[in-house]
Structure formats: structure tokens, C-alpha cells
Image (cartoon, rainbow, N blue to C red):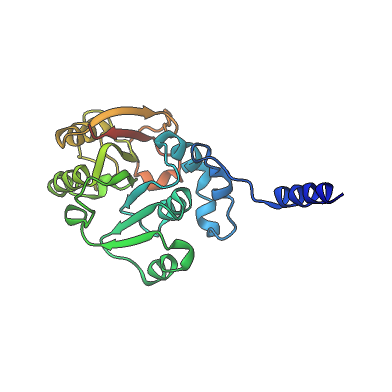
């Protein structure tokens, strides 16, 4: 009788225990469904496709990551939940608004470290310890000389095999950075050359955010999230 009772108690404990999700099976949908995410950020998910983007880049629990030109922290917040308590997110901006600082000083974002300063001097660790660095829709916002120094810093921050992700609004082919300021776009071929010159290898890209109907002749912000965007993954050898 005692043996049956012990088995019954053990069964109850097992049924009440939390489900453990393997590291390779991150539940991105649950992260994006978090009710504490601001409504305006949740509204952006449809055109930014963060679940597919995170899967493309292979972000996983325990990763040490960085979100450059993070703005209000759309991807900083998502990465924070994706890498978990054992991971880390450096969130970098030239400067942070008070509300952004307050947001990421909350206990739930204890794995986020804010870095204020220009991207060519961004205070990423130079110890080859990061797994992933992302710059989302803002590579074009940085002047060419500063991009050279920024890319070098990212190279020194990433571990061998680490991924540098670049997502931005596409400009016309062979336009270089002619549309960088006026249309807030940049030629993906220029991005490939610059990051390749820093020592990275283009390992893969996805068509997830491409829009062939975009004529590349309008400012990207006027297309209401429907601009033609390239998504590139560079690997540090």
C-alpha cells in the first residue's frame, strides 16, 4: 500500500513539474506573444517577421549577443527573452531616451547591458566572446568611415563562427550609398563588400523581407513597412 502511495505522489509531482524546452527548440512564438511587449512593437511583427528572422540567424538560449542602433529596443527585448538568463544582450545607441533606459533597467531585462556612444567607438567586448551581432534597418544611418571602424569592432567582438546579421532597406543595384540620406536605403552589394573587407564571409541570406514591387525610388519610411529589405548573415572565420 505504501508503495502505491509513493508512486501516486511521484506521479503528481511529475505532472506538476514545468515542461523544459530543449535549447535547440526555442519557443519564439511564446516570446513574441508576451503581453508585456508594447503594443506598438507587437504591431510591427507582421512586416518584420522576427520569428523567422531569429530562426534564420539561429539565436538560442545562452547566446551572447548585441543589438546595434537599437532605437527603442524592439530587437533588444526579443533577444533578451530568446537568450534567457544565461545569455547576454548588449544594446547600443548613440544615446538612449529616459524611457528606454527605464525599460531595460527592469529586473526582467537583467541580461541587457546598455552601451551609449557612436557605433565606430561602440564599447563591445574585444575578447571574441559574442555569438551574434545584429544591426536592423540602420546600417545606412552610419557614415562610411564610421562603418569601417564599426565592422572591425564587431569582428573583434565575435567568436570564430559567430554571426553578424545585417537587415536594411535596399537601394537600386550599383547605387552604393547615394540614397543613404535621401531615401534611407543602401546598396546590398556595398554592404557585402564593406563587411567582407573587415574579414567576414557571407554565409547565407534569405528573401523573407524582399519586395519586388518596391521600385527603390521612394524614401523607405513612406512604404509603411513594405520596403524591399535584404537580410544577410556574415560569419567570422
| Residue 83 drawn at (x, y percent) | 44, 49
User: Where does residue 154 sit, x and y in percent of width and height?
Assistant: 22, 45
Q: Quadrant of residue 172?
A: top left
- Taking the image as shown, residue 208 lies to the left or right of residue 199, namely right
Inspect this view and state whether residue 182 appears: no
Asked if residue 1 lies left or right of residue 167, the reply is right
Furthest residue in direction front, as rendered: 2
Left or right of 15 in this view: 228? left
In the image, residue 211 above or below residue 68: above
The residue nearer to you, when weighing 140 against 98, is 98
Look at 32% across and 39% down and name the residue there: 165
Against 179, residue 109 (above or below) is below
Instruction: Name the one closer to the observer, 94 or 133.
Output: 133
- Which residue does the image show at 27% across and 45% down from the upper left? 139
**Left or right of 12 in this view: 213:** left
Q: Could you say which quadrant of the image residue 70 lies in?
A: bottom left
Of the 4 image quadrants, the one containing the C terminus is top left
> Residue visible at 43% across and 43% down?
223
Amino acid at each position: 500500500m505504501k508503495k502505491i502511495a509513493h508512486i501516486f505522489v511521484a506521479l503528481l509531482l511529475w505532472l506538476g513539474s514545468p515542461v523544459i524546452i530543449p535549447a535547440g527548440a526555442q519557443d519564439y512564438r511564446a516570446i513574441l506573444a508576451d503581453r508585456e511587449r508594447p503594443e506598438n512593437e507587437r504591431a510591427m511583427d507582421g512586416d518584420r517577421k522576427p520569428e523567422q528572422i531569429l530562426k534564420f540567424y539561429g539565436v538560442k538560449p545562452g547566446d551572447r549577443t548585441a543589438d546595434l542602433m537599437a532605437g527603442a529596443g524592439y530587437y533588444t527585448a526579443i533577444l533578451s527573452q530568446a537568450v534567457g538568463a544565461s545569455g547576454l544582450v548588449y544594446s547600443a545607441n548613440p544615446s538612449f531616451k529616459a524611457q528606454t533606459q527605464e525599460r531595460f533597467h527592469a529586473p526582467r531585462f537583467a541580461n541587457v547591458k546598455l552601451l551609449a556612444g557612436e557605433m565606430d567607438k561602440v564599447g563591445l567586448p574585444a575578447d571574441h566572446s559574442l555569438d551574434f551581432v545584429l544591426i536592423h534597418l540602420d546600417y545606412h544611418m552610419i557614415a562610411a568611415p564610421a562603418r569601417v571602424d564599426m565592422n572591425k569592432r564587431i569582428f573583434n567582438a565575435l567568436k570564430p563562427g559567430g554571426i553578424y546579421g545585417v537587415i536594411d532597406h535596399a537601394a537600386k543595384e550599383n547605387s552604393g550609398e547615394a540614397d543613404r540620406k535621401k531615401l534611407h536605403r543602401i546598396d546590398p552589394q556595398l554592404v557585402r563588400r564593406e563587411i567582407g573587407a573587415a574579414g567576414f564571409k557571407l554565409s547565407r541570406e534569405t528573401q523573407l523581407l524582399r519586395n519586388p514591387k518596391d521600385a527603390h525610388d521612394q524614401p523607405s519610411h513612406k512604404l509603411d513597412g513594405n520596403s524591399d529589405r535584404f537580410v544577410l548573415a556574415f560569419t567570422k572565420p
